[in-house]
Image (cartoon, rainbow, N blue to C red):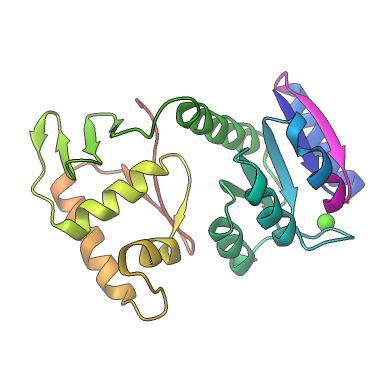
Amino acid sequence: MDVLIVEDDDAMAGALTAAVESAGHHAQRLSRGADALLSHRNFQVILLDLGLPDMDGLDVLRKLRQVTDVPILILTARDDERSVVLGLRSGADDYLVKPVKLVELLARIEAVTRRAGRAGGVPQEDIIVLEDVAVDLNRRTAAKGGAPLPLTATEFELLALLARHAGSVVTREQILDALWGDAFLASSRSLDVHLTGLRAKLQKPGFIINVRGVGYRVEASGA
Ligand code: CA
């Protein structure tokens, strides 16, 4: 796999390149956002630093998203929650907090490219299967082990949203936006209520994982 690393810091770029190449991938490093916009076509995944010398990384991300569906992982400084949320809402597939852990980097790259591979070439999936849970997006029903789950409309929307993004984080704001249309008017408390209801009906501890301070993630095994 060809991995584009957009990172202006030489030490960080060197570490990322070594990590990516240790997994058998080919890495190319660019320091400037403008160069990334010119050469993104040659790569299957992009690691994008948000603090670049010539452009805001979020602007690079938005421009890339206008022209390509290539998986993009943003690299962000610790505790920069606002950038994470903005990045995910601007079309990033996932994010990594610096300093980046090798194992985590490779796992995230694998997850986003696997998802992209599933989406590409095949028509929009109608039924998402995650372990013993099946989510039928057309009929708007869900089942566990073949038995229908008695979900409310909102619980179904919540499960479908998390399932569509299985393997990566969906932020609370993304959930609020998708389900209620306006993150700022929606009640965060009501999300907690629906989430609790959904979890009670699923009876699958560890299936929907809290990512503290950011959002939620469904693990993608078995898909
Ligand atoms: Ca930087």
Q: Is residue 186 above or below residue 58?
A: below
Find the magenta span and give its range.
Answer: 23-36
Residue 149 lies, in percent from the top left, at 11, 43
Q: Would residue 20 be found to the left or right of residue 34 on screen?
A: left
Q: Quadrant of residue 184?
A: bottom left
Residue 80 lies, in percent from the top left, at 65, 66
Q: Is residue 204 above or below residue 131?
A: below
Of residue 110 and residue 210, the one placed in the foreground of this image is 110
Q: Quadrant of residue 153?
A: bottom left
Of residue 100 and residue 48, the one placed in the foreground of this image is 48
Which residue is depicted at the point 66% across and 45% down? 67
Which residue is depicted at the point 63% across and 33% down? 103
Residue 178 lies, in percent from the top left, at 37, 61
The residue most toward the top is: 24
Ligand 1, image quadrant it occupies: bottom right
Residue 77 visible to the viewer = no
Of residue 181 and residue 67, the one placed in the foreground of this image is 67
Q: Which quarter of the rendered picture does the C terminus lie within? A: top left
Q: How many marks are shown on the rendered structure?
A: 0
Q: Would residue 56 be found to the left or right of residue 189 on screen?
A: right
Which residue is depicted at the point 79% across and 47% down? 37
Residue 191 lies, in percent from the top left, at 29, 67
The residue most toward the bottom is: 185
Q: Is residue 24 magenta?
A: yes
Residue 78 visible to the viewer = yes
Q: Is residue 171 magenta?
A: no
Which residue is depicted at the point 29% across and 74% down? 189
Q: Which quarter of the rendered picture does the N terminus lie within? A: top right
Of residue 181 and residue 200, the one placed in the foreground of this image is 181
